[in-house]
Amino acid sequence: MFFPTLNGLKMYKIDDISISKLDGWLGTRRKAVIDSLNPLQFSVDTGIDEQYSIYIFALSTQIGIAVLKARYVIECPLCDTVYKVVYDLEDIPKCFVCNECGSNLKNHEDYVTIWFELIIEPQEIIISEDVLDVVRTVSPLGKLVASALV
């Protein structure tokens, strides 16, 4: 597993297949996107229900699991300028003046986009020599794959 603490999702009755898909998906994200992970993209990529994906992402921010952190991006609905990024719901302002267009706006949930950030590094997956020996004996392609893994 890339993120062993994801096993803590089991106490929330998240099934092993969903945990495995989340672990694999998170573990293969490029560094350029790890601060803007979207549960809806995870849903599309893995075939897991959208609401369930959002739920799993939210649970992955909990103490004891803490693989992800929620990031709230407040945007002006008139000019799409990012007004502020916060990491706590209480820090979302009740109203704001857009720095770009000057509009005075009362905050509304439609102005807030929630992204998730990966906050821990994936663990390396170590492949034992026994596994490599099996891969080498399967086929010529297995020999090529095994040599690439060493």
Image: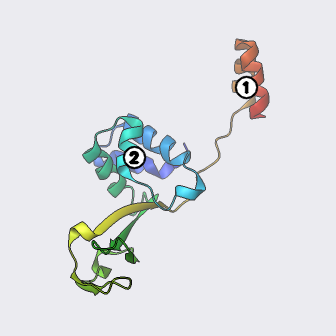
Q: Which residue is nearer to you in this view: 118 or 109? A: 109
Please tell me how crowded label 1 is: few (under 14), some (14-19), or many (20+) other residues with Cα within 10 Å. Answer: some
The residue that appears at 27% across and 83% down in the rendered structure is: 93
Q: In the image, 66: left or right of 58?
A: right
Is the C-beta separation of discs 2 and 1 under 8 Å? no
* Residue 50 drawn at (x, y percent): 28, 44
Of 111 and 135, nearer the camera is 111
Compare residues 30 and 75 and report the one nearer the observer: 75
Residue ID at (31%, 87%): 102
Mark identifier at residue 145: 1
Instruction: Please tell me whether mark 1 sits on a helix, a strand or a loop.
Output: helix
State which quadrant residue 131 falls in. Answer: top right
Secondary structure type for disc 2: helix
Which coloring applies here? rainbow
Q: Quadrant of the C terminus?
A: top right
* Disc 2 versus disc 1: nearer the observer: 2
Residue 110, x across and y down, in percent = 23, 66
Quarter of the N terminus within the rendering: top right
Residue 38: horizontal and vertical position, in percent? Answer: 39, 53
The quarter of the picture where residue 47 lies is top left
In this view, 137 is above or below 118: above
Q: Which residue is under mark 2?
A: 41
Residue 61: % across, % down? 39, 61
In the picture, measured across the screen, residue 115 lies left or right of residue 107, that is right
* Residue 58 circle label: none
Measure the alpha-carbon separation of dots 2 and 1: 29 Å
Residue at horizontal 74 percent and vertical 33 percent from the top: 149
Dot 2 amino acid type: Gln
Residue 41, can we see it?
Answer: yes
Give the residue type at disc 1: Val
Location of residue 68 (image quadrant): bottom left
